Amino acid sequence: MSELFFYIPKNEIRDDIIEKLDFLNSTNIFNTIFVVDYYKGPIEFKTGRDNTRLLLKENDLDKNIFGLLEKKSEVPLHELNYVLDKYFELAECLFYITNWMDSNIAKTLRTDGTVTGIFYMQSITYKKHFEILVKNFYPTKDIIPKGNFNALQLIETYFPDIASQYNKHTEHTAPTPTTSCGVQEEMQPPLNKTKKQPLITEIDAEKILLEQVFNVDFKKLN
């Protein structure tokens, strides 16, 4: 997860969580841009920093896809599925978080065009990577892992072409209902459409962000 740009918005973290975590209490890290530097680890972002490694991020992620494709012929299916599901969770998390940060940075921080451009490029890179992962390893929606961010709804929202292919596959494979000869099947009342739930609540999002990025163990805090 090197060369990841991120910030922690103060208004998105509940006070009770801040009180439980020493590093949030003692360090002024809110509303500040950080980057997981390739060589130095997490550091505060400074204007004028060389960000050329961000341009190489897409190539690095493509190498991960090629590595997974090679594994398909080298390891048993159950081992491949285990690795795939773990990687899916990571890719889903990075896509969701980078997309959220890009969408909310303007109303959270005072930034210039360079910074907003960085977060936009980062978001597009992880979005494309998640799309490639789904297209190459998850041809039908019934094998999509649940993930932490309602993966199927993410796909329906951000990748309508994939969702459309899933729906066509479902329609093609669905059995055709039959009726007995000479007996008209009673018409069933139309089902009420279920109201779509939010992709994820803000509370869940902030918890997952802290767990995935900062390795916070909430079980020890409760």
Image (cartoon, helix red, strand yellow):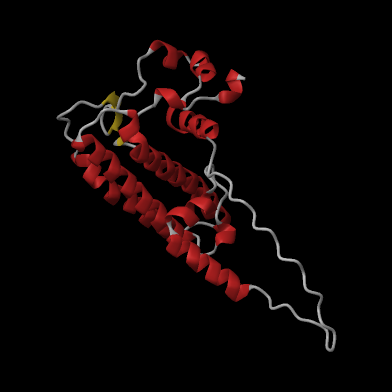
Decide if residue 187 is in sight here. yes
Q: Which quarter of the figure is the N terminus placed in? A: top left
Quarter of the figure with residue 99: top left
| Whole-percent x, y for residue 135 in the image | 44, 61
Q: Residue at x 59, y 60 (%)?
A: 142
The image quadrant where one finds the C terminus is top right
Number of callouts: 0
Q: Is residue 172 left or right of residue 211?
A: right
Tell which of 43 and 201 is nearer to you. 201
**Residue 63 at x, y percent in the picture:** 33, 52
Q: Residue at x 57, y 24 (%)?
A: 218
- Name the side, left or right, on which 96 lies relative to 63: right
Q: Residue furthest right?
A: 183
**Residue 175 in the image, given as x and y percentages of width and height:** 68, 75
Rendered view: 58 above or below 52: below
Q: Position of residue 14 (x, y in %)?
A: 51, 22
Residue 72 visible in the shown view? no
Relative to 149, is 23 above or below? above
